[in-house]
Amino acid sequence: MSTPFRPRDNGIDLFVRLTPKAALDRIDGVETAADGRSHLKARVRAVPENGAANQALERMMAKALGVPVSAVSVVAGGTSRLKTLRVVGDTAELVERLQTLSK
């Protein structure tokens, strides 16, 4: 199984499949798509209008990874369910925290 992230010099790129308008905000673990790529499954209560669901995802992932909200941003897939988040910080620490989240 591939990992749902790609390490970078100053953090990670995290691949997420987002479900908006959920009953509660939560991270549902890692899923592998038919093409073999892995992504983290996430749900947020926010609606997908005016970037509200993306902002809710950024806040939730920042809290889960223990980084400031300003360190997390959607860099690809702004209007798609499949998104790429850039998380700035110590790469080794972020990878370790992400592995505990995705179990």
Image (cartoon, rainbow, N blue to C red):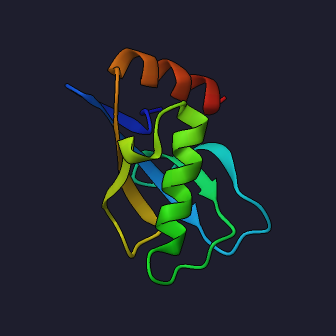
Quadrant that contains the C terminus: top right
- Left or right of 84? Residue 62 is right
Quick one: 4 or 67, which is closer to the camera? Answer: 67
Q: Position of residue 25 (x, y in %)?
A: 71, 57
Q: Position of residue 71 (x, y in %)?
A: 37, 41
Work out whether residue 82 can be spotted. yes
Outermost residue to the bottom:
49
Where residue 80 appears, as percent x and y from the top left, is 41, 72
Image: 75 above or below 79: above
> In the displayed image of the protein, which residue is found farthest to the right?
23
Relative image position of residue 8 (x, y in whole percent): 23, 29
Q: Camera-side residue: 55 or 16?
A: 55
Q: Residue at x 36, y 52 (%)?
A: 73
The answer to whether residue 31 of the structure is visible from this angle is no
Q: Does residue 29 lie above or below 34 as drawn?
A: above
The image quadrant that residue 10 belongs to is top left
Residue at 42%, 33% (x, y): give it.
2
Total number of numbered labels?
Answer: 0
Q: Residue at x 52, y 73 (%)?
A: 52
